[in-house]
Amino acid sequence: MNIPLVFWLVPIASVCALGMAWFFFKQMMKEDEGTPRMKEIAEYVRRGAMAYLKQQYRVVLIVFIVLAIIFAFMAYVLHWQNPWVPFAFLTGGFFSGLAGFFGMKTATYASARTANAARQSMDGGLKIAFRSGAVMGLTVVGLGLLDIAIWFLVLNYFYQGDSMALITITTTMLTFGMGASTQALFARVGGGIYTKAADVGADIVGKVEADIPEDDPRNPATIADNVGDNVGDVAGMGADLYESYCGSILSTAALGAVAFAMVPDMQLRAVIAPMLIASVGVFLSILGIYLVRTKEGATMKNLLHSLSLGTNVSAVLIAVATFIILYLLEIDNWLGLSLSVISGLLAGVIIGQATEYYTSHSYKPTQKISEAGLTGSATVIIKGIGTGMISTCIPVLTIGVAIILSYLCANGFDLSMSSSSLSHGLYGIGIAAVGMLSTLGITLATDAYGPIADNAGGNAEMSELGEEVRHRTDALDALGNTTAATGKGFAIGSAALTALALLASYIEEVKIAMERSHIELTNLKGEIISAANATIPDFMNFFQVNLMNPRVLVGAFIGAMAAFLFCGLTMEAVGRAAQKMVEEVRRQFKEIAGILEGTGTPDYKRCVEISTRAAQHEMIFPSLLAIAIPIVVGLLLGVAGVLGLLVGGLSCGFTLAVFMANAGGAWDNAKKMVEEGNFGGKGSFAHKATIVGDTVGDPFKDTSGPSLNILIKLMSMVSIVMAGLTVAFI
């Protein structure tokens, strides 16, 4: 098929994003890194982060090679898959890892420069930290669009003349989404275990037992803690959002190929529409990045307003641009589809605002948790858990309304549930997810900014820059905790919409696998037809996908259980690793003379090694389990069981992820509020109680919670890639 000229906006946008990322990186590198002591600490962190990432990539490489060999066997020997699948899988993982690597490299160079800029002004520190975070955001969208554009052009060249070309191309491209999801899960879980083991160890022994400040150079776990911020909250997050971004675009493109299959010209336009919306979002993200600035003496609300200005302007402009793009593409019901995108954008904004309300210490929920510290750590834990649970209401209801609105707007409010109505409605849900992530360049910048500001605070403390500088970096760090929670809310919300779209993509992949295996089915009229001609109702009827089928119900229970099992495994992994860190820090305080007096030098390297080994060992089983569950369910319970699994995992995983991310963020900022002088201030009884809450919340918000949105999408991706295996056992 002939590629329309407008498609070339996709690779152009990707090059512009990568070019601006490089520009911001070079700007940051021109800034002064500060005193010799600041440079020394930054170098410690840089070396530790790079050493960990190299070790992680070695482990992940082995997993990818094994999986690629399995996919190649299925494709070339058993003919259960498209022959491009192994290659698409590998490139998805490669680009996902590359996005995390570039983001982390930038962050490790930016933290000392942010601390040094904060010696002069709040605005200087904010600008360096935020634009360094923008390197991550623009790298993710740039690499994502580049990978999508290359694969679309390559597959289009080889499948020209095929009557099902676009359906085959888009479902094949979903495979590189699985590669990205697999890499992201290893990065999130491994990085999360690393950073929280160090953080918990540093807090328990340093702040609670030894009564020394956070990031005090006398604490042996301090360097490992700062390294962890980079490998978990930057490299892991970059890989995470890369797969979210690509997954939403690819699943929507696949749904567009199905929904408009009967109109070839419009089918192609429907496929490239989500790519074009994301491409325009790149340019609007760059505009939003330049709008972020603040004044000296800014309050938390002023700082939040500064960041909100950039993200909100980008969101409003992409909403307007969507109407123009879909109108010019002349897609049927362009107005309804545009409204679907608006529903996704509004859902993202509402989830972000709700997250800010429940996690920022500018509002009552977090303030109440701080106040609970006056009566001890138990009440802090109880209040935090309750706040996290209550905080799930608004995101869940918002996503529910967004799903219904995007579905109805896209199918012209057709309530007949016909095959055409279902296909167009599901396309609307997919494009709503694209809308939510279309300005990821700036929303991810606000997220990546957080760990940079946190590291800047650590550098300021260890370099003894003074109370005024630490006050500025603390304010930037507290802002980062809120923006990080907001970013996680966006990621989790988009995961819910994307996973729902992937459910429909799974059905299409099963139909393709049935065609490949020459399996026929009966339609609702009892006639024998080919799988390619089956409507969605025909398909559901053939596989008995309904709530009265025990396979569907069992699959749903397993999906819900998988979310809890995964969280339990990762939480226990953090606990075991943190226990080793606590023992090591206690040992050093006891055996190395003069540490607490400031005359002895802690063994920072030993703590880095403990976190590295623990993360490498502990991340493998939970990550492989996420891949294995859909395969086993497919073999034992068939297609109906897999659909139940994905629904159960989506509904339970989404709610649990919101709870954990918000509870963890609230606990963290409750501690920050006390440290600002409230309820007794640093060293008080309330401070020690909120430190315990923050310690419990660390694996909630930085390990288990954010990994769940990858889990629900990875299970969908694995199900799609393994559809041929499932069908072979029908």
Image (cartoon, rainbow, N blue to C red):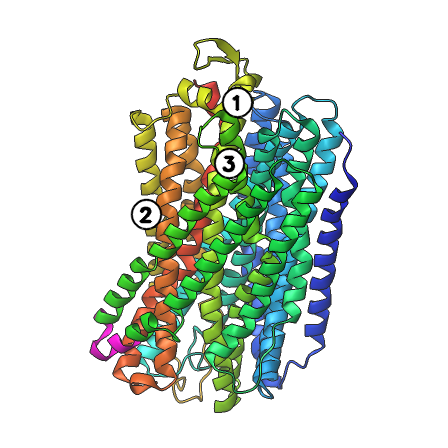
Residue 191 painted magenta: no
Badges 3 and 1: C-beta atoms under 8 Å apart? no
Q: What kind of residue is marked 3?
A: Gly
**Real-space Cα distance between discs 2 and 3?**
31 Å
Q: Is residue 730 above or below residue 288?
A: above
Residue 274 position, x and y percent, is: 62, 44
* Residue linked to disc 2: 564
Residue 531 position, x and y percent, is: 53, 17
Residue 371 painted magenta: yes
**Real-space Cα distance between discs 2 and 1?**
31 Å
Residue 411 position, x and y percent, is: 52, 35
Q: Residue at x 43, y 17 (%)?
A: 730
Q: Residue at x 71, y 52 (%)?
A: 14
Residue 723 in view here: yes
What numbered label is drawn on residue 425?
3
Labels 3, 1: front one? 3
Q: Is residue 173 above or below residue 676?
A: above
Q: Residues within 10 Å of mark 2 (few under 14, many from 20)?
A: some
Q: Compare residues 487 and 62 and report the one nearer the observer.
A: 487
Q: Which residues are magenta?
A: 370-378
Q: Please report whichever mark, 3 or 1, sits nearer to the chain's N-terminal start.
A: 3
Q: What kind of residue is marked 1?
A: Lys
Per the image, label 3 sits on a secondary structure element best described as helix
Per the image, label 2 sits on a secondary structure element best described as helix
* Residue linked to disc 1: 511
Magenta residues, dominant SS class? helix
Q: What kind of residue is marked 2?
A: Phe
Q: Compare residues 656 and 617 and report the one nearer the observer.
A: 656
